Every structure is written in C-alpha cells, then in structure tokens.
C-alpha cells in the first residue's frame, strides 16, 4: 500500500532546485577545467583537440561531437567522437553554413541534423549545435554537437560550451613569430602584475590553490588573493572564464 507523503513546501523545493543548480555548475566547471588542461598541456594541437573533445561532448550531453578546421579543401575533421566522420575527412556542404561566415552575428546555430557528418548506422532524431571557433574575429573552425534533446538559446549549458569553444579556438590559431597584432585578450592581461600573469598562465592546468602555491613557492592564501584580483581586473566571473582568456591570450605556463 503506497505511503502518503506530505506535499513539498516551497522552501524545500527551492533548496532542491538550488542544490541541483550548484551540482550542475560544479560539473560544468570540472568539464571546462578538463578542456583547459588539454589545451594547455597537449603535446601538439591534434592530440590536444582530441583530448579536449570528450569533456566538451559530456558538457553538452552530446552523443556525437566533432571539431572542424579550415584547410585548403574546406572544413576538415580535426577531432571526432561517437559515430562521426574520422579525422582527415572533409564535411560536404560545410562551406555554406551560416556560422562560418565572417558576418554571422550569433554565437551559435542549431536545428535538426541535416548534414552528412555522422556515419551511416548512427542515424537518429539528432539535434545539432554548431559553435563557430573564433579568434580575433576570424572563424577558424566549428564545434559540432549532436544529441537527442533540442538545443536552444535558453540551454543552461550554452554559456559553458561557448567558453569551451573559446579554448578550442586557441588551439586552431596559427602560430606567429611576431606579436604585431594584439587582441583584446592581451590588452586585458596587461592590467595584471607580473606575478598575477604568472598565476593566470597556470589556471588552465586545473591545479588547485595548494598546487599552484607549491608550483610558485608562495602560500595558498596568497594564491587565493591573486586569483580574486585577477578575476576582478579581467572582469571574469570564475576561474573557468579566466582559464579561457589565458588560452586565448596565448599565455605560456
């Protein structure tokens, strides 16, 4: 015989909602730290992109995920997971996507999957998300995610996915021996002291305050103070945003 339970009070319901949101934010931060670590510690870009793709796919709840980069033949697969085309393949029709146009005004486009970037045998009612990988206003590639649940502008994971896209774009940027062009990230980093820049460069590694303190030979409390000042000076809401900025700015740990 079922047991009658009293209705949940609004206070308890609010507490449960707050707890779920906190757990979701903690999970998103952990995924972004994994992406940042892959971007910062990868031996070479191809390996780093493949290592970063798994936490990005998990962050978006995607069954299939892919990173494309511009090459002479078009948008070529650089990393993939699930039932996607393997690295080295060119995605047909990708040149016509709205998100690869320089004048595309949005951070993403989404809709029902209509493109042939998923291999036969993995068909399903997939919903597709395309995030342009931009650096200095240039579209260097695209992050593709496919899942059963529809993507949309109110998706709670979208801001974290956009941060992840910024990290991935840093891996696609061609290396340059000169620093003639300075982007907005470098200008923001100039606000920091040399020690703060040193701490910022290490944040993408995913180390905690104690590990950072050991690496730098200073106290954990001092590291905490430095990070608080870094977030304030750079107008970053959390460590994940600071890590993304550090990668985009090209800081070397």
Image (cartoon, rainbow, N blue to C red):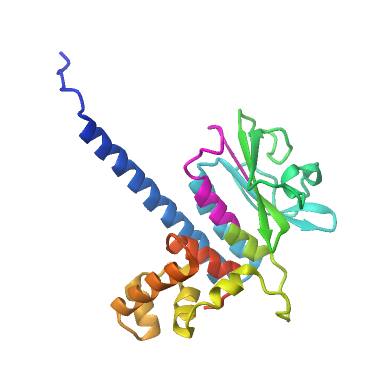
Residue 232: quarter of image: bottom left
- In percent of width and height, residue 192 lies at 49, 78
Q: Nearer the viewer, residue 136 or 61?
A: 136
Work out which quarter of the rendered image holds the N terminus and state it. Answer: top left
Relative vertical location of residue 247 with respect to residue 122 in this rendering, above or below:
below
- In percent of width and height, residue 191 lies at 52, 77
Q: Which residue is drawn at 61% across and 46% down?
A: 65
Q: Which residue is drawn at 67% across and 58% down?
A: 134
Residue 252: quarter of image: bottom right
Residue lying farthest right?
Answer: 73
Specify start and end residues of the magenta stretch as a single range. Answer: 144-165
Q: Residue at x 49, y 45 (%)?
A: 157
- In percent of width and height, residue 38 lies at 53, 64
Tell me if 240 is positioned left or right of 140 in this view.
Answer: left
Q: Is residue 93 visible?
A: yes
- In percent of width and height, residue 25 lies at 39, 50
Tell me if 226 is positioned left or right of 177 in this view.
Answer: left
Q: Which of 192 and 112 is in front in this view?
A: 192
Q: Which of 62 and 182 is in front in this view?
A: 182
Callout count: 0
Tell me if 167 is positioned left or right of 220 in this view.
Answer: right
Q: Does the segment drawn in magenta span residue 236?
A: no
Relative vertical location of residue 30 with respect to residue 232 in this rendering, above or below:
above
């Amino acid at each position: 015989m079922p047991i009658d339970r009293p209705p949940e009070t609004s206070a308890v319901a609010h507490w449960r909602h707050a707890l779920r949101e906190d757990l979701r934010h903690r999970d998103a931060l952990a995924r972004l730290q994994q992406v940042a670590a892959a971007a910062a510690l990868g031996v070479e870009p191809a390996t780093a992109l493949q290592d970063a793709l798994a936490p990005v796919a998990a962050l978006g709840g995607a069954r299939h995920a892919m990173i494309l980069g511009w090459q002479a033949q078009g948008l070529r697969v650089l990393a993939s997971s699930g039932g996607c085309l393997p690295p080295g393949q060119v995605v047909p029709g990708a040149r016509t996507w709205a998100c690869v146009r320089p004048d595309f005004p949005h951070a993403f486009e989404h809709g029902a999957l209509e493109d042939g970037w998923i291999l036969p045998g993995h068909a399903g009612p997939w919903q597709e998300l395309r995030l342009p990988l931009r650096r200095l206003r240039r579209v260097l590639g695209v992050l593709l995610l496919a899942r059963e649940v529809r993507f949309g502008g109110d998706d709670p994971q979208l801001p974290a996915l956009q941060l992840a896209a910024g990290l991935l774009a840093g891996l696609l940027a061609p290396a340059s021996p000169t620093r003639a062009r300075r982007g907005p990230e470098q200008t923001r980093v100039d606000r920091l002291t040399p020690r703060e820049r040193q701490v910022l460069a290490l944040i993408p590694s995913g180390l905690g305050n104690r590990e950072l303190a050991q690496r730098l030979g200073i106290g954990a409390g001092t590291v905490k103070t430095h990070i608080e000042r870094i977030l304030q000076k750079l107008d970053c809401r959390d460590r994940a945003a600071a890590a993304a900025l550090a990668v985009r700015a090209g800081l070397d740990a």
